[in-house]
Image: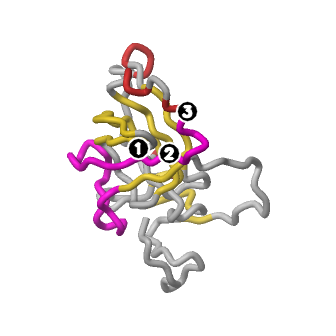
Amino acid sequence: MDGERGAAEGTEDGFERRPGEETVTLPAAFDAGLYFIGRIGTPWTRRADCPKNGRQTEAVCTVRVDPAYVPALQNIEGATHLILLYWMDRAARNLVRQRPRHADGSRGTFSLRSPARPNPVALSVVELIRRDGDTLQVRGLDCLDGTPLLDIKPYYASTDSRPEARVERAGTSG
C-alpha cells in the first residue's frame, strides 16, 4: 500500500474510496498476537509501483531474517521454492467490499487477493535463488520495501499445487 499517508477526502485512514466500496468499524481489541521474524527488501516504495502479483516481475528481492530465527533456516537451501507469509502493514483494514481498478463493480474482500483486508496477511510462492547467512534472495514478490515477514515454509508441488482450482467472476451483487 502507499507509504504516503494523510487524510484523503472523506476517509479517516487516508485511503481513497472508489464507488461501490464499503467499510466496517473494526473491533476495539485484537484476538491474537504475532511475531515478525524479519523484513522484506524490495525495489518498491510506493503502492503504485508494486506489481499486482509476484509473477509479473523478475526482480530479485531480499528476505532478511532476524538473528533469533536464523537457526530456523537450517536446510532451507533444499527447497527451490518457498511460501512467504507477510504482513501488509500499510494496507487499509476496514474494507469489506472493494472495487478493483479493472472491475465493473464491487467485490467482497474475501473474493480478492487485495492487501486491504481485516488481517492483511499476504502469501507468495517465491523462487529461492540463494541463502547468505540470515538473508535469502528470492524472486516472485509483490510487496513494499520493509514489509514485515511472518513465516517461511517450503513449497511442495505434490501437496500445495491445485491445478484444478478456478476462480469465477460472479456477479457483483452482495
Give the residue type at disc 3: Pro
Determine contact: label 1, label 2, CB under 8 Å: yes
Identity of the residue drawn at 50% across and 45% down: 65
| Mark 3 vs mark 2, CA separation in Å | 10 Å
Q: Which residue is mark 3?
A: 71
Relative to 129, residue 112 above or below: below
Q: State the image coordinates of residue 30 (x, y, percent, origin top left).
A: 75, 55
Relative to 39, residue 140 above or below: above
Give the residue type at disc 1: Thr
Q: How many marks?
A: 3
> According to the image, what is the colour scheme of the structure?
secondary structure
Asked where in the image residue 2 lies, by quadrant, the reply is bottom left
Which quarter of the rendered picture does the N terminus lie within?
bottom left
Taking depth in this image into account, of 144 and 47 the one nearest to the observer is: 144
Specify the segment rendered in magenta: 42-71
Q: Secondary structure at mark 1?
A: strand
Closer to us: mark 3 or mark 2?
3
Q: Which residue is mark 2?
A: 65
Q: Which residue is mark 1?
A: 135
